Amino acid sequence: MGKELFAPCGLYCGVCGVYMASRDNDQKLKEKLAHAYGVTPEQIACKGCLSNEKFVYCQRCAIRSCVTEKNYEGCHQCNEFPCKLIDNFPFPVGKKVILRAVPERKSLGSEKWAEEEENRYKCPHCSTPLFRGAKRCASCKELVEIE
């Protein structure tokens, strides 16, 4: 797992739908996500928050800018967490995950935290990898509830 997937905010990119759709060139998922984010399917492209190819929303992320200015790897190193940037995070599911994940990253360390995030986002019925926010497994079609 590459460090470009260790988003400073606490949202592990390896389980992001945009990242997964881009990585797998999943046109159906790209179209679904494009509709949800109000962008074109061509804009559903990302190689991780810390890569040179970021999703359009992540390109202008105030949290990443703050972490960079403080010379931190992520919010898990900041004594001000949670701050107004987290409080104002535009996606409620993402904010909920950040509030859970940042303390976990702080206590586990980045590598173990990322491994735990990958394990968390697997279908409980068939173990297929899921993206954060998935409501149904693409493989077995069972409903899932993972946060």
Image (cartoon, rainbow, N blue to C red):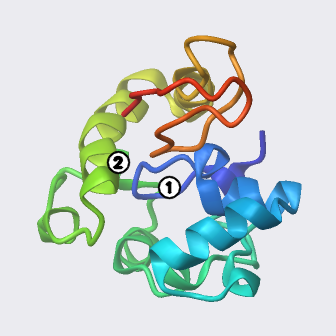
Q: Is residue 104 left or right of residue 5?
A: left
Residue at the image point whose x is 47% and y is 87% from the top: 60
Q: Eyeballing the image, is 103 above or below 41?
A: above
Q: Residue furthest front?
A: 141
In the image, 44 versus 60, the foreground residue is 44
Residue 30, picture quadrant: bottom right
Residue at the image point whose x is 60% and y is 52% from the top: 13
Mark 2 lies on residue = 77
Q: Eyeballing the image, is 83 above or below 38?
A: above
| Amino acid type of the residue tagged 2 in the rendering | Gln
Residue at the image point whose x is 59% and y is 77% from the top: 34
Q: Eyeballing the image, is 72 above or below 51?
A: above
Residues packed near mark 2 inside 10 Å, few (<14), some (14 to 19) or many (20 plus): some
Q: Is residue 85 left or right of residue 4?
A: left
Tell me the SS state at disc 1: loop
- Image quadrant occupied by the N terminus: top right
Q: Position of residue 135 (x, y in %)?
A: 46, 39
Residue 140, picture quadrant: top right
Mark 1 lies on residue = 73
